Image (tube, helix red, strand yellow):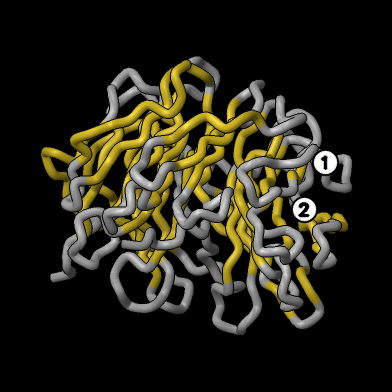
Amino acid sequence: MKAIQPLIIPLLLASCPAIAQEQQAPMREFPFGIFDSENSLTADVTLADMDGDGDLDILAANGRHWAQQDYLFLNRGNGRMLEALPIGDFLSASYTIRPGDLDGDGDPDVVVVRDQLPALVFLNDGAGHLQAHGAVPDSIGHARSALLFDADGDGVLDLAIATRRGPDRVYRGDGKGGFGNGVELPDSGFGTTAIAAADLDGDGDNDLVLARRDRGISAIMRNDGAGNFAAEPLSDSEGDHRKTAVADFDGDGRPDILLIGPDGSVLMYRQESSGFGSPHKVQVASGDVVMAIAAADMDGDGDVDLVVGTEGENRLLRNDGRGNFTRETLPGGEADTYGVAVGDMNGDGRADIVLANSGSSNNILLGLADE
C-alpha cells in the first residue's frame, strides 16, 4: 500500500469562505489502534512500507527536547502494530524521521533529525532492520523539520533541514547512503520550523518553501535546476508560522502556498500568472492551538481535505471542492497532537489517520464510508 501523500495542503480561496460548525468526522477508534507508550513525547509519525510486505508501517520520532527511543512499528496489514523495532541503540531528542531509498537498493532507508544533535542515517536491509550508517556532517542545530528531495536532478535524494536557530541547509546525497557537507540556503532568515518542496514555476526542478516563527519572514527558495537556490521572501509573512504546504488548490494548474500559525490562522498565497502576491487570510480552527497538519482526499471525492492536530480535540476540515470547509471533530478526545500522517493502514482502500501524541499513547483512526 502507498501512503496517501502528506502534502500539507492549502484550504481556502480568495473569498475566504467561512467554516461551518460542527459535525463528527466519519472516522472510528478501534481497540488495537493504540501504539507506543503514553510516556513517549512523540514529535512526528511517518508512514512507509519498511519491511516490504505491502502495507504501511509507522516511524515514530520520540523525545522532542528530551532523550527517548525512536521506534519502527510494523503493521500486520490490518492496522495493528504488534511488533516494534528500536531505531538505534540509544536515546535522543528526535523531531522527525524521513524515509527514502538513500543507497539505491529499492527499499526505504531513514534519516533521523534530532534537536541539537547530528542527523543520523540508518540503512534498511529490506526487512525493516535499520543499521546505523553514520551522521550527516555539519548537521548539529535546533532542527525542527526536514525533507528528502532531489535538489539537482541527478536522481539521488538530497536532504534539507529546517533549523529554528541558525541557517537552513541542503545536503547532497551520494547515492550510497551518505551526504556531503551542508550548503546554507541564501538568506539571513531565522526561525524555520517547516519545509516543503515543489516545482513552483514549472521548470521541472524542486523549489523549497520555508515556514518561519519568531517574527521571521517565510520564504521561497527558487532552484536553478542544479541545486543552487535564490531567496524570495513571501510578502506580509513576518510572524509565527509553524507549518507550510504547497499544492494547486484552486485548480488553475499552478501550485499555491499555505502558511499556518499555532492559533489556526492561515496565510494563503495564490499563484497568479505574475507570481505570488499578497496573501489572503482566514481562520481555520478558531480556539484550537494547531500543532500539526496533513492533507489528503479523506472522502474520495477528488479534492483535498485537511487533518488538523491540536492541543485539544483534533479536526477534519472537509472540502466541498470549491474551498469551502466544514469542520468536523475527530474521535479520540483531547491530546497534544504534534504529528499527523494519512494512509490506508488496514487495506480497505480508505484513508486512515495516524496521530503522534506527546505525553499520551499514539493512535490510529480508521476511515469509514460516508453514510
| Residue 345 in picture, x, y percent from top left | 25, 54
Indicate which disc, 1 or 2, sits on the residue closer to the N terminus: 1
| Residue 238 in picture, x, y percent from top left | 76, 45
Work out whether residue 18 or residue 351 is closer to the camera in this orientation and state it: 351
Q: Amino acid at mark 2?
A: Ala
- Label disc, if present, on residue 189 of the rendered structure: 1
**Residue 142 falls in image quadrant:** top right
Confirm whether residue 24 shows in the render.
Answer: no
Residue 169 drawn above or below residue 357 = below
Name the residue rendered at 72%, 75% in the picture.
204
Q: Amino acid at mark 1?
A: Gly
Count of numbered marks? 2
Residue 139 drawn above or below residue 198 = above
Name the residue rendered at 46%, 64% in the picture.
18
**Residue 133 falls in image quadrant:** top right
SS assignment at label 1? loop
Name the residue rendered at 79%, 57% in the picture.
221
Mark 2 surroundings within 10 Å by alpha-carbon count, few (fewer than 14), some (14 through 19), many (20 or more): many
Would you say 33 lies left or right of 229 here?
Answer: left
* Residue labelled with disc 2: 219
Marks 1/2 in contact by CB < 8 Å: the verdict is yes
| Gap between marks 1 and 2 measured at Cα | 8 Å
